[in-house]
Amino acid sequence: MSPGPLDGIRVLEVAMYGFVPSAGAVLAEWGADVIKVEHAITGDPQRGLRQTGALKVEGDPNPNIEHANRGKRAIGLDMSKPEGLEVLLELAKRADVFLTSFLPGHRRKFGIDVDDIRAVNPKIVYARGSALGPRGMEAEKGGYDMTAFWCRAGTAATITPPGIEGMIGPPGPAYGDTISGTNLAGGIAAALLKRERTGEPSTVDVSLLGSGLWAMGHTIALTSHLNQLMVQPSPGVHGSPINPLVGVYETKDHRYISLVMMQPTKFWADVCRHVDREDLIDDPRFATSASIAEHTGDAVAILREVIATRTLPEWSERFATLAGPWAPVQDTLQAAGDAQVLANEYLVRAGDLDLVANPVQFDVAAPHTGPAPGFAEQTDEVLEELGLDWDRIIELKTAGAVT
């Protein structure tokens, strides 16, 4: 097994829930040694998450903790006790990255803010994940991906069609957390490169709000320039009003196919051949971009009728040679079994679970990963690496500083 690009990098993670821990998970899959610091008694509150919507997990493994904590080691530590903080600072001395989700007030309270950590390790990269960014009147406030990423940054309002009461929610748990965590991991990697080249450490900030805006960046640029909102069509509407090859079509088995061929004249003849309607190739209604735009309704009606005559597996076989981009509309179970997903090893084995790997591959290989640690599972191992003998470890446990 070849080492990852961050092999030898040590990350000290003092974080909870999904966002910042998912950054640590990405760094671990890139080869870093990530030590997860959890409260000595309560641990990461995410460990208690068993129910998300209608889905409930009984027993272990629990995907709600595994997804964002794969491949790490865990230590149970109470930073509010002087002995616990002493251990934390000893770990920080040996780390390349200090990664935290704690709010500014709590960082100051526990003595783990930038200046505190840099006092023991001047070259450490200090990385902070926040809800609303490090500046402004609300920098001290917390938040979740639902509030800061999904609602406040514009996705919820943009994805909800007119006439629907309320809003459409995120498609699943930790949606904005995971995207934002990958952003934070990338920022940390860039800061490590800067430190290697210049010797200067950085303070890295990524927020759920900033990540949500970035995800909507094209839309925000477009709507701000035109001073018009992007209005979502009602469900069931075909798609483009000027291009029959950009839209969704239902198959005989009530599945859906998405066609996205932005240049209709380039792909029209090929589509006609694949749906056994060669008679439409030279139809003057579909000869030019202008005529296709004018007669999109006719083309959509024809394609709806013909695509409804075969099942998705039948169309998938036929469309294997289709020149233009298309895709089956898949749920998460179908996506997890997709042959192309499996061929690229986008799912990796982590203990007893198959987890989606972080999306970056190096040297055309999937990352190697492991399961999330049990609560405080490597506490003794990590303390021994600090050079503490068993008498001192027992003292720390008796004092409640470590688990």
Image (cartoon, rainbow, N blue to C red):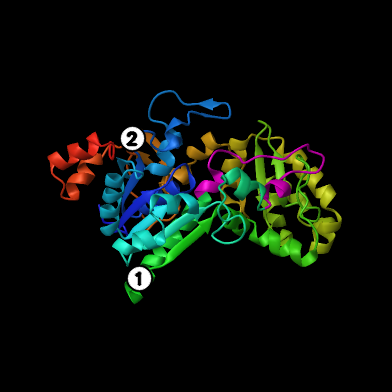
The mark total stands at 2
Q: Which secondary structure class fits the magenta region best?
A: loop
337 left or right, relative to 262: left
* Residue at left offset 69%, top offset 40%: 168
Return the residue found at the far top.
58
Residue 168 part of the magenta-drawn span? yes
**Do we see residue 316 in this rendering?**
yes
The residue nearer to you, when weighing 13 against 346, is 13
Residue 321 part of the magenta-drawn span? no
Secondary element at image label 1: helix
Q: Quadrant of residue 355?
A: top left
Q: Quadrant of residue 371?
A: top left
* Residue at left offset 30%, top offset 46%: 82
The residue nearer to you, when weighing 133 against 30, is 133
Residue range of the region highlighted in magenta in the rendering: 154-178
**Mark 1 or 2 closer to N-term?**
1
234 left or right, relative to 90: right
Return the residue found at the far right.
294
Mark 1–mark 2 distance (CA, rounded to whole Å): 33 Å
According to the picture, the residue beneath numbered tag 2 turns out to be 375
**Do we see residue 101 in this rendering?**
no
On the image, the x and y values in percent for residue 399 come to 25, 37
Three-letter code, disc 1 = Arg
Secondary element at image label 2: loop
Crowd around label 1: few <14 · some 14–19 · many ≥20 (10 Å)? some
Up the image or down, 149 lies above or below 236; here it is: below
According to the picture, the residue beneath numbered tag 1 turns out to be 195
Crowd around label 2: few <14 · some 14–19 · many ≥20 (10 Å)? many
